[in-house]
Image (cartoon, helix red, strand yellow):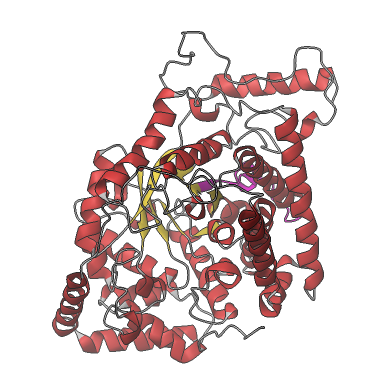
Amino acid sequence: MDAHEIAEGRARWQRRYDEARKRDADFTTLSGTPVEPVYGPPEGADVPGFERIGWPGEFPYTRGLHSTGYRGRTWTIRQFSGFGNAQQTNARYKMLLGAGGGGLSVAFDMPTLMGRDSDDPQSLGEVGHCGVAIDSAADMDVLFDGIPLAGVTTSMTISGPAVPVFCMYLVAAERQGADLGKLDGTLQTDIFKEYIAQKEWLFPPEPHLRLIGDLMEFCGTNIPKYKPLSVSGYHIREAGATAAQELAFTLADGFGYVELGQSRGLDVNKFAPGLSFFFDAHIDFFEEIAKFRAARRIWARWLRDVYGATSEKALWLKFHTQTAGVSLTAQQPYNNVVRTAVEALSAVLGGTNSLHTNALDETLALPTDEAAEIALRTQQVLMEETGVTNVADPLGGSWYLEALTDRIEAEAEAVFQRIRDMGSDGTITSGLLRGIEDGWFMSELAESAFLYQQALEKGDKRVVGVNVHTGSVTRDLDILRVSHEVELEQHRLLAARRTGRDNALVKERLERMVAAARTEQNLIPAMLDAARAEATLGEICGALKDLWGVYREPARF
């Protein structure tokens, strides 16, 4: 790009920046030196390829979605939390919100993630242990008691039974008197990544995709601010992916959901802004920043050039980040505070829209109140003390960072082509389904994980406290333990609800839901009615399993 084009770009950015709302804050260094809101090439310089870097708030959005960067609005502090029963988790949410958290992010226990009730025999010993137990809309009432859902954004990390859990959330909001049309939040819902990495599915792929399509239509019509689908790379990375694989598999899943929306006749300019993403921030500092920047650039180009999006917001890749759980160590766990801070800083420098920071004790148990507070304060120190919010994309133009960004983008594009080639019709969706069926994604992740483990065991990759600098004076941590009484109490509550509800009404509404599932009508209204009658998660999912069957991953050796 020549000097004249660069100057024109800077002038466009300046006009947008001048018109945008900025925070009332001190934008100077610690020493009091004023800093510019963005930096670029010197006046008069020719910079070949600068159109791939550009300016904040301008296609291809490598440097961020907004001209102001974090001067306009800082990222949302959204701490992922849930344990025990709804009452215990409600108390943790109030603690986090009271300490400065900006939104809620719900972690569910394994029975809930698998669409089972707490008293299901397969739930034995798992209730409340990796998140909160939710059996019906009554649990949602308790979970959000004293927290007005109309005034707080709520993210829910669940995919297989995401739609019935979402219906229970809506019922809780109705009971609070909220206007459902104005709710704001995010539901994960991403079933592709379950088949690829996390393995928490209920049905075969086609019924899951039908539910997701119904949810996209319902939210687009009735709850326009709510984001019905958060495409998750986090679980793919935690399963062993490289940075480029995380990026490529995640964006490919996103393209699959774009194709799903278009197959339903939805306008990409209207539904694409409701898609969001969820990435891992791992420990290789610059590689992670490059990954986030490349993600925005790829998404904008594909939405415009492949899927025909014309509105600016449809081209925006909005993403939440969580620091890498897999990078934390049980050995010398206080080192995890440092790891989390470095990973969080990479997410911020990569332009994340919201952020969760892991607690130092999460390799051992769910976080204690003290560990959760340290994780929260880590974000607040970055936000309030470091100056990273003063300048948009402060590393933009770095030779190293730009080379990494280009390399990761090229690797991702090669994966997209491979996925397309696997399919029968040239679409990403067809390739995704074939790759899942053939075990290709699983084998790719297994190979990457194996190569890393080999490097770790040889000492080529070093982890402090694990294979280098192993001496320590630290003592064992006091960890949070979920009492077995939680499970027993949840059983008692669930039995009392079943006794106290109108069981004939529950049966009628479940039958009506199944009847709707046999047609092409949108399933959300019927499922919502079942949730209003206090049908349980296991009953709703069980009725649909009877109709659609369950998915069994083919055995491979």
Residue 255's image quarter? Answer: bottom right
The spot of residue 401 in percent (x, y) is: 70, 34
Nearer to me, 236 or 473 = 473
Q: How many dots with numbers? A: 0
One can see residue 393 in this view? yes
Q: Is residue 32 magenta?
A: no
252 to the left or right of 129: right
Nearer to me, 202 or 21 = 202
85 to the left or right of 234: left
Is the N terminus in the top left, top right, bottom left or bottom right quadrant? top right
Specify the principal SS of the magenta part.
loop
The spot of residue 199 in percent (x, y) is: 52, 73
Residue 432's image quarter? Answer: bottom right
One can see residue 255 in this view? no
Instruction: Look at 79% across and 72% down and name the residue there.
Output: 422
Q: Is residue 293 above or below residue 416?
A: above
Residue 311's image quarter? Answer: top right
Q: Is residue 310 magenta?
A: yes
Instruction: Look at 27% across and 69% down and name the residue there.
Output: 137
Q: Residue furthest front?
A: 471
Instruction: Look at 48% across and 22% down and name the residue there.
Output: 387
Q: Is residue 490 above or below residue 369?
A: below
Highlighted magenta segment, given as a residue range? 306-320
The spot of residue 286 in percent (x, y) is: 64, 37
Instruction: Look at 73% across and 23% down and name the residue there.
Output: 9
The spot of residue 72 in percent (x, y) is: 48, 27
